[in-house]
Image (cartoon, rainbow, N blue to C red):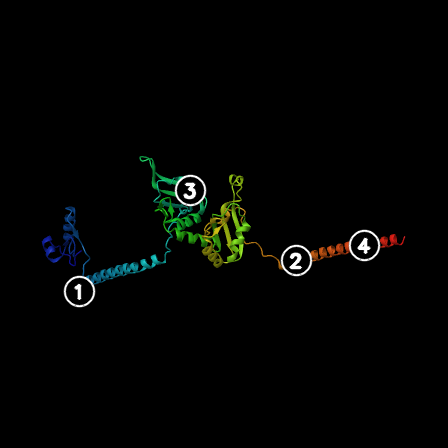
Amino acid sequence: SSNSGDDVSCSNWEQNGEICRGSGYGKVVSVAAAAAAAAAAAQQLPFCFVPPFTSLEQRAKLDSAKRFVTELNIRAVIAKQATLQMQQPQAQAQQPQAKPPRQPITMLCRIYVGNIGYDIDEDGVRVAFSPFGSIKAVEMGWDATRTKHKGFAFVEYELPEAAALAIAGMNGAPLGMRSIRVSRPNNVTDASQVIDEMIKESDLQNWLYVANVRRDLSEGDLRLVFEAFGSVLQCVLAPATEAEAANGDKHRGFGYLQYETAQEATESMKNMKTFDLGGQVLRVGRAATAPEKSVPHLLREPPPPKNNNADQSESSSTTATNFQTEAESAACSLKSGAAQILSANNSVAQGNGDSGS
């Protein structure tokens, strides 16, 4: 469009009007200028038309506004990044740390035995470590080239309690002509911590594991020995297998004891862990697995307390029975004495009669 009706040539338009090639501000002042712009567009020239401004002051204000908006955007981005960096450590601290996977029970039942003499075979290792519990397997490191073992073995017990006692009792002990080394395998870590967690989870603080018990002793015999350190609520021994029972064994040589308090159990363990009972050294430690797995008839709950009234009535009835028995015995004695007196009197009377005649 034009402010006046006169046409302006392209040269005049280029001088009076403004066209910015690429970017900038421009002003179309005639139809000829529009035709020139269309021709330039046909030639694919990068022309850009900007709405007209009345003054340079407005252009300066617009540039200032653009710069202000850009600065605000930059500040907002920086503040958002700073907030995220502050929130990330707090979120990580609030997240519960995942517990490491627990070692399988079978791994806690295995021990490593090193520095074994070449004169000791698999049976010798089994006999040396059997006092701590029932052994499932003994694996000797075998050297096929030299046709003998490599001086180490892995012993697997049925219970982790037996493995813990074997490590404590056999590390550095003599076996044959050497002192053996006993420890956990390299792939077993934090075994003691895992066992402590098992004891807490199963509520076994006042339970003890006892091994190397003579096979001819009964549960009552074992209870009588351990009652010196506290009130024993339960004393159970693992029942013998059919083969063991055929040999005359009453049990498998290990069992469990339950004390009334954890302190009594601790005191008993300290004093009885190497006690010689009938020629066999007892092995005593904390119970870590549920006792009912080894002793099916075991009741985890302690037996109910005895009724004092019932005990008193039973005692009274027993006393009455004893009195009755004593009275009957005294009556029999009196009858016997009276019979003897009558017999003696009859004899005297007969003697007097014979002398008179």
Quick one: label 3, few (<14), some, or many (20+) residues within 10 Å?
Answer: some
The answer to the question of whether label 3 and label 4 lie on touching residues, with beta carbons closer than 8 A, is no
Q: Earlier in the sequence, mark 1 or mark 2?
A: 1
Mark 2: which amino acid?
Ser
Left or right: residue 51 compared with residue 312: left
Left or right: residue 76 compared with residue 110: left
Residue identified by numbered label 4: 344
Rendered location of residue 307, percent (x, y) = 62, 58
Real-space CA distance between mark 4 and mark 2, rounded to the nearest whole angstrom:
43 Å
Q: Earlier in the sequence, mark 4 or mark 2?
A: 2
Mark 1: which amino acid?
Glu
Q: Earlier in the sequence, mark 1 or mark 4?
A: 1
Residue identified by numbered label 1: 57
**Element at label 4:** helix
Q: Earlier in the sequence, mark 1 or mark 3?
A: 1
Mark 3: which amino acid?
Arg
Real-space CA distance between mark 3 and mark 4, rounded to the nearest whole angstrom:
80 Å
Say which quarter of the image contains residue 67: bottom left
Real-space CA distance between mark 1 and mark 4, rounded to the nearest whole angstrom:
162 Å
Q: Nearer the viewer, residue 95 or 224?
A: 224
Q: Which mark is residue 126?
A: 3
Q: Nearer the viewer, mark 1 or mark 4?
A: 4
Q: Which mark is residue 315?
A: 2
Say which quarter of the image contains residue 175: top left
Real-space CA distance between mark 1 and mark 2, rounded to the nearest whole angstrom:
119 Å
